[in-house]
Structure formats: structure tokens, C-alpha cells
Amino acid sequence: MRRIPWRLDPHRFSDVRRISEGNGCAEPGTISLYRYWICRYVDYCRTQGLDEEQELTRVGARRFALWWRSQGSPRRGGFTTTLNSSRSALRAWSFALGVLGVKVPPWETPATPPSLSAIMTAFVDYLNDVRGNPPQTVHKKLTHMAMLVEHCRKRRRRIGNINGLAAEIVAQLEGWCRA
């Protein structure tokens, strides 16, 4: 494995390397390339006064790539290549540190679910309270109902309440059964 002699390994890199080489999850060349990006990332965090662990997110990796392309590198080049290479290395670094017990933030923040309309909220309450459906089933049924509501919207049919929704479902089923 080729090493860059003028940079010291980042803290805990030897532990991460030992784990990666031991379980065969990364080739020596990949580890060397990741080391190169991680060293750059550590330098970036130190010069910008950032917490290395807390910046290990998808958004933080993008900020780093933007900084590297605009200020950190003496060379100019394509941003996409820089983003993809650095993001891959930093994601692996984040996961490896998490395995070692270091508290790192989630790589991606979970998407916030869209707010539900009154009719969908009533439908969810019905599924939970009356039917006792598990969360996976409620999510699946909500997805299907959203598709039905979109279908009705495209055909300029308004569904005002849960009874209107039930009536629309019956009308759709009757139309399909006649066909």
C-alpha cells in the first residue's frame, strides 16, 4: 500500500485499517485512497474550526468537497469527481468510526414525512384504532390512498371526507368489475 509520507495517519485510522483489512471489505488501494481523502478532510476541519465527528454527514461531505474544489486544492477540476470520491471515503470513515464506538451523527437525516390532510389523518386513525394495523401496513395503505387521491385529482373528482373516499373506492371497483 502506497503511503503519503508527509501526512500522519488521522486518529484511529490504524484501527479502521486493521478492521478493513481483516474482514476484506476494502482493498489496500481503496484504503490508501480513502486515507488520502480523510487526511484532506481532517485538515479542512482543523482549518475551518469544525468538529471532525459532527461534520461526518452527507451534507458535511458536500461542504468539504465544495471547499476542496474552491480553496483546498491547488488544482482545478470537476466537482462531481471530487464529490463522489470524497463522499465515498468519508462515508466509509463515518461507518467505521461508528463501529469503533465513536459517536457520529447519522450519515443522512431521516426524511420528515409530509403532513397529512384531514381525510388521511382520519384514515390513519381508523387503521390504528379500529383495525389495529401495524405501522408497515398503515404506511402501505397510505401510499396506495395517496395514489388514489392523485388519480381522482387528475380526473377532477373531489373527495371531501372519509365517506367520499369510500364511495370513490367502491365506484372504482365497480368500474373495474364491469370491464
Image (cartoon, rainbow, N blue to C red):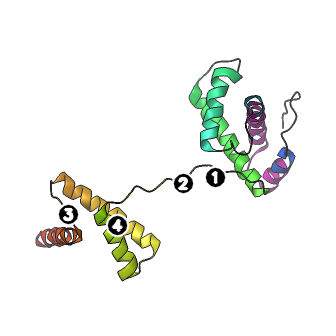
Check disc 2 and report the residue beneath it: 110
Tell me which secondary structure the magenta stretch mostly adopts.
Answer: helix
Rendering coords of residue 149 (x, y %): 25, 59
Residue 173 image point, x, y percent: 18, 71
Q: Residues within 10 Å of mark 4 (few under 14, many from 20)?
A: some
Task: Reply above or below: 127 against 161.
Answer: below
Tell me if mark 1 has few (under 14), some (14-19) or many (20+) residues whose alpha carbon lies within 10 angstroms of its own. some
Q: CA distance from mark 2 to mark 3?
A: 31 Å
Residue 59 image position (x, y, % from top left):
59, 40
Which disc number belongs to residue 94? Answer: none
**11 or 122, which is in the foreground?**
122
Residue 34 location, quadrant: top right
Return the mark for residue 160.
3
How far apart marks 3 and 4 lie (CA) works out to 13 Å
The reply to whether discs 1 and 2 touch (Cβ–Cβ < 8 Å) is: yes
Residue occupying image coordinates x 64% and y 24%: 69
Q: Earlier in the sequence, mark 2 or mark 3?
A: 2
- The quadrant in which the N terminus is found is top right
Inspect the magenta stretch and tell me whether residue 98 lies in it: no
Viewed as shown, does residue 123 lie left or right of 44? left
Between disc 4 and disc 2, whose residue precedes? 2
Q: Which residue is mark 4?
A: 121
